[in-house]
């Protein structure tokens, strides 16, 4: 049983560019959350998708957007990249958005903005 | 707003020694608390969680944590450290108790285990 898979594993972009990160949830999971982990920091919640809708959002600008597909996979898009967007982006999946079912995390996408 | 504070960004112990990683929380609702471990180049793995009930929670790999409401603490312990325990540990609180699985993480504690 595959866990949470994220692609790509590493990505290098320049300021002002746009990037799309992808996440496939664990089998049987229908909810995807995205977190940003800057170097030396704990993960920060970006947003959560359930039933193809954004259900909750953290304190991130509108440059961060997402999508969930009917197969429950998800994308994170970041426009107009800034140097400060360099971070590890983690995807987590779960069964439902409001229970405390165990969150399963992927290994992340390391984004470097030059 | 909910928050957690992890005391000590780096902790070093000898193999076989007690591991104690400190976490204090702030929550306006009865907290749901978590400890996660992150090995290099990997995602987060749940060690244990407290929701309701017994205040001493046992997790994987011999770790346990005790919820102390009077001290607003949820410290992580392991009686005897192993080299494989070297990793970064994050304490987290659920943003609205059991009503969401949105987590608020601390800044992490990097555990080094010396031979």
Image: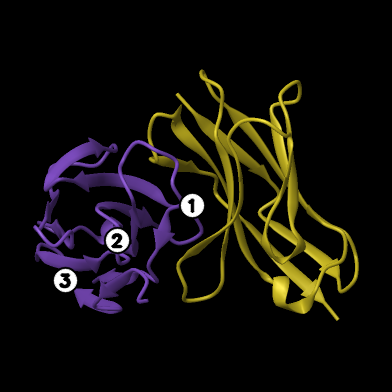
Mark before the other along the chain sequence, 2 or 1: 2
Pointer 3: what residue?
A14
From the viewer's perspective, is B17 left or right of B8? right
Name the residue carrying label 2. A28
A114 lies above or below A84: below
Q: Secondary structure at mark 2?
A: loop
Q: Which residue is mark 1?
A: A42
- Dot 2 and dot 1 within a common chain: yes
Coloring scheme used: by chain
- Rendered shade, chain A: purple
Residue B106 location (% of width, % of height): 55, 45
Query: Is disc 2 surrounded by few (<14), some (14 to 19) or many (20+) residues within 10 Å?
Result: few
Along the line of sight, the residue nearer the viewer: A87 or B3: B3
Q: CA distance from mark 1 to mark 3?
A: 24 Å
Residue sitting at x 78%, y 72%: B113
Question: First in sequence: mark 1 or mark 3?
Answer: 3
Q: Between A113 and A89, which is closer to the camera in this rendering?
A: A89
Residue B4 is situated, as x and y percent measured from the top left of the image, at: 57, 36
Nearest to viewer (mark 1 / mark 3): 1
């Amino acid at each position: 049983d595959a866990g949470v898979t994220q692609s790509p594993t590493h990505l290098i972009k320049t300021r002002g560019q746009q990037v799309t990160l992808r996440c496939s949830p664990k089998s049987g999971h229908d909810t995807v959350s995205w977190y940003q982990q800057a170097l030396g920091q704990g993960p920060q919640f970006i947003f959560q998708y359930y039933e193809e809708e954004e259900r909750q959002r953290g304190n991130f600008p509108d440059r961060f957007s997402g999508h969930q597909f009917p197969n429950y996979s998800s994308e994170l898009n970041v426009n107009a990249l800034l140097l400060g967007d360099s971070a590890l982006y983690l995807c987590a999946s779960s069964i439902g958005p409001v229970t405390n079912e165990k969150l399963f995390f992927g290994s992340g996408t390391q984004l470097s903005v030059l | 707003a909910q928050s957690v504070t992890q005391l000590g960004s780096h902790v070093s112990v000898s193999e076989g020694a007690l591991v104690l990683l400190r976490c204090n929380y702030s929550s306006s609702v009865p907290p749901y608390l978590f400890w996660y471990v992150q090995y290099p180049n990997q995602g987060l793995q749940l060690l244990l969680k407290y929701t309701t009930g017994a205040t001493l929670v046992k997790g994987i790999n011999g770790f346990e944590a005790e919820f102390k409401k009077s001290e607003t603490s949820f410290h992580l312990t392991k009686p005897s450290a192993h080299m494989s325990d070297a990793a970064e540990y994050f304490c987290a609180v659920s943003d609205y108790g059991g009503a969401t699985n949105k987590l608020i993480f601390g800044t992490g504690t990097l555990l080094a285990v010396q031979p």
